[in-house]
Image: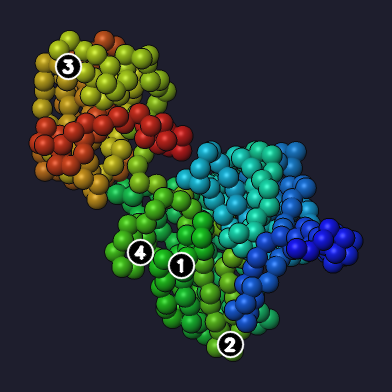
Amino acid sequence: MESGTARRKAGGHTGFAGLLTACAVGLLVAAPAHGASGGVRWAPKPAISKVTCVKECGSRKRVRGGSTIRLTGRNLAGATKVVFHGGRGPRDDKSVKPRARSARSVTAVVPLSAPTGPVSVWAGDDNRSKRTGDVAVLPPLPPEVNPELTPAPGPRDPGGPRLETGTSQGKFFFGAARSVKFSYRVNSDAPASVRVDLSRVADGVVIRSWPAQAAPGAVNEIAWDGYDGEGQLQPEGRYAFRVVASGSNGAEARSSQVADTRRDAFDFYRHIFPVRGRHDYGGAGARFGTGRAGHSHQGQDIFARCGTPLVAARGGVVKFKQYHAAAGHYLVIDGDQTGVDYAYMHLVSATPFNVGDRVYTGQEIGRVGDSGNASGCHLHYEMWDAPGWYDGGRPFDPYPLLREWDAYS
């Protein structure tokens, strides 16, 4: 057996020094990362000490969606993404790639839908900073409304064509009677090769492209209906048109900077709030599932003055139009691309639409009333999943969706 003295000689002072060295190395290089050779190297753990808004800020330099922020700290040169954390769990987290980085700072553009909450920097899946305290994120600025052609502010090569652009609206609702339209004019001495891209601002993905040859001075127009080039309905969010034009001499012009979230941009929504006037949601008895004589409440009541306009929350085809002693004048619309039926009850009078008619999102379908068994003027609103209203489907609580639509409509 080895004696205590021998053990001390073999590993006493030298072993303690080695342990200190190992600890120091562990503190300096705490997280693994993969090198170009495929091996594993050790990278320092990033840390954030301060979050500052530097561009497109709200009042008093507050952060908003679309702002550029600078995160100051240490060990940030290897940052691969910035994460905006919302509530508990990752469900509402939003992440972006850094725009610039150094050992002591990282800059990033705040996602338009970033939640209020802590922020962290990642330098690999297993190497991330501690979360900051809560960072309040204000809503983004709305898109610039420029329905008339105006000079585009994007970069232009010397000798490149001059561009004018315009976008018809700042909000576009799927299924509306009018698509969102983008117009552009190329001012050059000869026809120019043009490509118009429509991008999702949230991730920069180009979902549609339109190549063309543009005649000098001619006004060109493009309409978008909510689908990508493969016929897939796109998610809600902000989208932006971008033009790249190349003159006969090869010089290029772009309609806007890639980071511009407002020029020729619009917010795309799939629904609109149905009551177009002052309203409230009543008390607890107005909610879905509350008790009624012999049944439970199958929708949400929205109270408004008699005669307040009602519009289709989602376009589709009229499935039912009738009068009922309890529901009063009502209609049911089979919503396009949803599998959901939308029911509107207690209208002041019969809707002018008939079964089989097509209705567009945001189109007026009637007025708030108190027909049938109603206490006060209000819309009784129901939503039923497939296969539909009293046709095998089941009603579900529309209140969370109504509040969401109400916030942006």
Q: Which mark is residue 206?
A: 1
Q: Secondary structure at mark 1?
A: strand
Whichever of callouts 3 and 1 sits on the residue coming sooner in the sequence is 1
User: Would you place residue 201 above or below residue 271 in this image?
Assistant: below
Residue at position x 77%, y 53% from top?
Answer: 72
Question: Which part of the image, by quadrant, shows the C terminus?
Answer: top left
Q: Are marks 1 and 4 in contact (CB under 8 Å)?
A: no
Whichever of callouts 3 and 4 sits on the residue coming sooner in the sequence is 4
The span from disc 1 to disc 4 (Cα, nearest Å) is: 9 Å
Residue at position x 42%, y 77% from top?
Answer: 211
Q: Which residue is mark 2?
A: 250
Q: Position of residue 284 (x, y in %)?
A: 36, 14
Where on the picture, by quarter, is residue 287? top left
Whichever of callouts 1 and 2 sits on the residue coming sooner in the sequence is 1
| In front of the other: 192 or 1 | 1
Q: Position of residue 10 (x, y in %)?
A: 84, 67
